[in-house]
Image (cartoon, grey):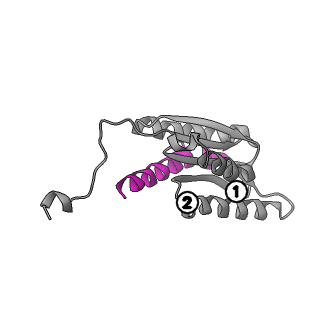
Amino acid sequence: MTRAANRPRRRDRKKSPLPVLIVESRYYPEIADDLARGAGAALDKAGVPYERLAVSGVFEIPAAIRLIGRSRRGRGIGGYIALGCVIRGETDHYDHICREASRALMDLTTEDGLAVGFGILTCPTAEHARVRAAPDKKNKGAEAAKACLDMMALKSEL
């Protein structure tokens, strides 16, 4: 075996990266916009093109990603970023939505092998969510984008 055969393969840096699809819940539009602004800035900095797709709520995000990921369109997408917010209310609805959406997104990564950045905020109050979403504060949208890019890079190395 030659020395070159033992080296890890590297992506052709001249090729354009596959785009990322940001799937965002619009239930809390201002929070969604801040998350998307942070994610978009991180993707722009990395030179990765992206599109945004709006869905009604956090519960719909995994289904939208799975439908697209298994479609012809999904073959041209390098990764997905799930953005949204669930704020605790007076009932246990919060617990069910957080648990099921998180589990479904994990299933997409482990069963379907998709690169997914998790940017769904689960917060006790709207103020907590605003601080975590704001690009000039906690910037969780950018963190989700970076996680997605890391998983895309890992997939390309395998």
Residue 109, disc: 2
Disc 2 residue type?
Thr
| Viewer-nearest of discs 2 and 1 | 2
Q: Is residue 59 left or right of residue 157?
A: right
* Image quadrant in which you'd find residue 106: bottom right
**What residue is rendered at 77% in x and 64% in y?**
95
- Which quarter of the figure is the C terminus placed in? bottom left
- Label 2 crowd bin: few (<14), some (14–19), many (20+), radius 10 Å: some
Q: Is residue 15 magenta?
A: no
**What residue is rendered at 49% in x and 36% in y?**
41
Magenta region, mostly helix, strand or loop? helix
Q: How many marks?
A: 2
Disc 1 residue type?
Cys
Tell me, yes or no, whether the two marked residues, 2 and 1, touch with CB atoms within 8 Å: no
* Name of the residue lying farthest toward the left: 2
Q: Taking the image as drawn, is residue 139 in sight?
A: no
Using the numbered discs, state the Cα–Cα distance from disc 2 to disc 1 in whole angstroms. Answer: 23 Å
Q: Is residue 129 positioned above or below 1 on the image? A: above
Q: Is residue 143 magenta?
A: yes
**What residue is rendered at 45% in x and 40% in y?**
18
Secondary structure under tag 2 reads helix
Give x and y (percent) for residue 49: 47, 34
Q: Is residue 47 left or right of residue 36?
A: left
Which sits earlier in the primary sequence, circle 2 or circle 1? 2
Give x and y (percent) for residue 99: 71, 65
Residue 123, disc: 1
Q: Is residue 15 left or right of residue 78?
A: left
Taking depth in this image into account, of 91 and 153 the one nearest to the observer is 153
Q: Which residues are magenta?
A: 130-158
